[in-house]
Image (cartoon, grey):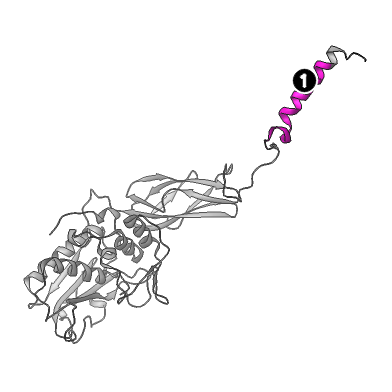
């Protein structure tokens, strides 16, 4: 048998070891091709569903990239940023949001090629500044003192949620009629400039006999579209239900005033974006985001029943605390009110 030279034998061993370290079939590892780059298939703005800012505040956004299988990848390319309403917020090329002093809701967009994503931005009055919003109540002489006190407390509570004035309206230019049944408000109340919401409260004999309803509230005249915020509203008190237990009266006052502001499907004319009147589903972006804050779960729709009412705990939060839910605040935002998420907290029991 011929002898194999030692140098040839050592070279063969080194070659086998080298091949074992590179052959995927032997090592069980996937072979990486350095000349292949993952293709960007989707982008997403990293952050909350709604960015909430106070006036004179900044917030940094960034974009995440994903391949066709949803795996994160390096975007490599900077996003092109834009905003819907620059008077409320601007965004620089690096995705830094800066508020510009105007309150309200807008959208920020990011784009890389044909790929796009957006995020809602809400600019609200800082909690340290007092609310500038005002609900003015006018009572007829026959409204009982307990009802007056409950409605005044409810107005103060809603004023902590809605934080800023609304577009000015000359009340004298509005319709002559504002009321339910046969009641018409006197000329002395249908004048002046209104930047908040004016609510007329009276005792009515028009409720059906035997009804459980203590009162009915709703807007009767709105500001101009596309933001259907109330200018003049009505709360009619059932003359047969004047003696209401204190806890129930507190809830009724909040509930009916919420209807005056437009919550729960009572807005007349063109509906706000959060209500699909055709099938009775609530779809408002901010109202549904408020629902997720309130109950810790995401929803795509809220069905309504029982006369366009949300359930008590969804509309008002916990009844006994005088607390207003995030869902209601989100609905107010969808309607165009300058509301604040932090306004839902317990300010006090009254």
Magenta span: 9-29
Q: Main secondary structure of the magenta part?
A: helix
Placement of 134 over or under 235, stated as above or below: above
Which quadrant of the structure image shows residue 239? Answer: bottom left
Q: Residue at x 31, y 57 (%)?
A: 294
Crowd around label 1: few <14 · some 14–19 · many ≥20 (10 Å): few
Q: Relative to the observer, which residue lies in front, 88 or 336?
A: 336
- In the displayed structure image, the side of residue 284 where residue 153 appears, left or right: left
| Residue 46 horizontal/vertical position (percent) | 46, 47
**Residue 23, quarter of the rendered image:** top right
Q: Is residue 305 magenta?
A: no
> In the rendered image, which quarter contains the C terminus?
bottom left
Determine the secondary structure under disc 1: helix
Horizontal and vertical percent position of residue 48: 41, 50
Residue highlighted by disc 1: 14
Q: Is residue 73 left or right of residue 180?
A: right
What's the residue at 16%, 80% (across, down)? Answer: 187
């Amino acid at each position: 048998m011929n002898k194999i030279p030692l140098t040839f034998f050592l070279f063969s061993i080194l070659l086998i070891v080298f091949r074992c370290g590179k052959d995927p079939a032997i090592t069980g590892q996937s072979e990486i091709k350095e000349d292949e780059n993952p293709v960007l298939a989707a982008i997403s703005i990293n952050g909350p569903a709604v960015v909430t800012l106070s006036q004179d505040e900044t917030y940094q956004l960034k974009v995440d990239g994903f391949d066709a299988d949803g795996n994160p990848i390096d975007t490599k390319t900077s996003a092109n940023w834009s905003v819907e309403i620059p008077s409320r917020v601007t965004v620089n090329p690096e995705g830094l949001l800066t508020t510009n002093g105007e309150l309200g809701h807008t959208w920020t967009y990011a784009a890389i090629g044909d790929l796009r994503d957006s995020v809602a931005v809400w600019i609200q009055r800082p909690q340290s500044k007092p609310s500038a919003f005002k609900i003015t109540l006018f009572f007829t002489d026959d409204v009982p003192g307990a009802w007056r006190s409950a409605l005044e407390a409810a107005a103060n509570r809603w004023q902590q949620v809605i934080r800023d004035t609304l577009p000015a309206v000359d009340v004298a230019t509005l319709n002559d009629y504002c009321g339910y049944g046969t009641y018409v408000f006197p000329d002395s109340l249908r004048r002046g400039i209104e930047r908040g919401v004016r609510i007329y409260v009276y005792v009515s004999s028009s409720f059906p006999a035997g009804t459980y309803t203590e009162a009915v509230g709703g807007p009767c005249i709105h500001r101009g579209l596309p933001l259907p915020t109330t200018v003049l509203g009505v709360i009619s008190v059932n003359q047969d239900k004047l003696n209401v237990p204190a806890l129930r009266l507190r809830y009724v006052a909040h509930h009916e005033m919420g209807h005056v502001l437009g919550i729960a499907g009572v807005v007349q004319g063109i509906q706000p974006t959060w209500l699909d009147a055709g099938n009775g589903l609530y779809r408002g972006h901010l109202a549904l985001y408020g629902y997720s804050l309130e109950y810790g779960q995401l929803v795509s729709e809220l069905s309504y029943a029982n006369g366009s009412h949300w359930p008590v705990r969804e509309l008002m939060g916990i009844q006994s605390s005088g607390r207003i839910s995030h869902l209601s605040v989100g609905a107010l935002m969808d309607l165009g009110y300058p509301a604040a998420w932090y306004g839902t907290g317990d300010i006090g029991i009254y």
